[in-house]
Image: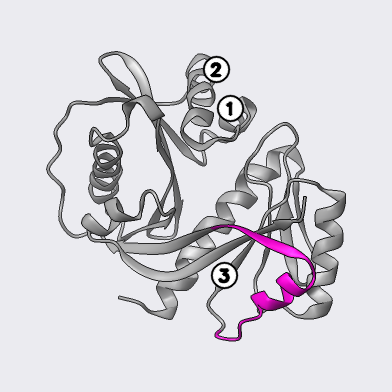
Amino acid sequence: MKNTSLIEDNINNLTALWKTVGIPFASYHKNDTFEYCKIENSGWPNKLWFRQDVTENDAEKAIEIMKSNLGLVLPYFDIFGTNSYEILETKGLIKKTEQVAMALQLDQKFDQQNNLSFKRVLTNEDAKIWTNIYPDAFGYVIGKEILIQNNENVQFYLFYFENQPIGTCMLFQTGNNIGIHGVGVIPQMRRKGFAEEIMKFALNLAIDSNFEYALLQASAMGKDIYTRLGFEDLFVIQNYVLKS
């Protein structure tokens, strides 16, 4: 499955999501070598990304932007085979986290336990609930206005267990692919199979909508679930930040 088309599709879905949520806030910016989105009072997306291999000159320009927009994270897509991430490290950036970009061909529905109920976020009240529980799962805030301004372009979902909100996810379409993002479960409800149930819900919804591939970027904590569901690795994303 690992091919250049899926690699490009994965990057396009992820970066188009960042761009899409930033535009309503006039927070998306682009120049000849990189793009960035920084939304005030939100911990996401707040990313600066390159669409080609990194050079020393481009890295210096990016770091200047990061210094004047504190909180930006630079995701390095390790697809060029050049070890150019070393330029970022030489210039003083440090790797904060690492993810694995993954893809799954959508050709067979998944059996679900149906022990969770779900709701698409379409109201202010639901957006408030979603943004209240998201930091418990991920450790950073997504502003409520992001959901309200983008609920037509991005599908935000809440998941409930016994009428209590316990999980989140976001679905974002590019072409005939669906990106699955922000799959999280509050800490006290982990290790009960709920994250896998949320994934199966999202995948079955995508299959019913005739999408061809599901795309995501896995953290170390979630990768085993995605591998078990059949996702295959595409490339590594190294997330760099300024030294504190």
> Dividing the picture into quarters, in which one does residue 94 lie?
bottom right
Earlier-in-chain disc, 1 versus 2: 2
Mark 3 / mark 1, whichever is N-terminal: 3
Q: Amino acid at mark 3?
A: Phe
Neighbour tally class for label 1: few under 14, some 14-19, many 20 plus, Cα within 10 Å: some
What mark, if any, has residue 124 been given in the picture?
A: 2
Q: Nearer the viewer, residue 141 or 111?
A: 141
Q: Front-most of 233 and 174?
A: 233
Mark 3 secondary-structure assignment = strand
The image shows residue 209, relative to residue 128, as above or below, that is below
Contact, CB < 8 Å: mark 2 with mark 3?
A: no
Colour convention of the picture: one colour
* 55 lies left or right of 202: right
Give me the disc on residue 117. none
Q: Is residue 65 visible?
A: yes
Side of 39 where 231 appears, left or right: left
The percent position of residue 139, horizontal first and vertical second, equals: 55, 35
Taking the magenta stretch, the answer to whether it contains residue 95 is yes
Q: CA distance from mark 2 to mark 3?
A: 35 Å
Nearer the observer, 242 or 37? 242
First to last magenta residue range: 81-97
- Residue 158: tell me if it is visible: no
Q: Which residue is mark 3?
A: 77
Q: Residue at x 85, y 67 (%)?
A: 61
Residue at image mark 1 = 148
Q: Amino acid at mark 2?
A: Asn
Q: Residue at x 61, y 47 (%)?
A: 20
Q: Amino acid at mark 1?
A: Ile
Question: SS class of the residue under badge 1?
Answer: helix
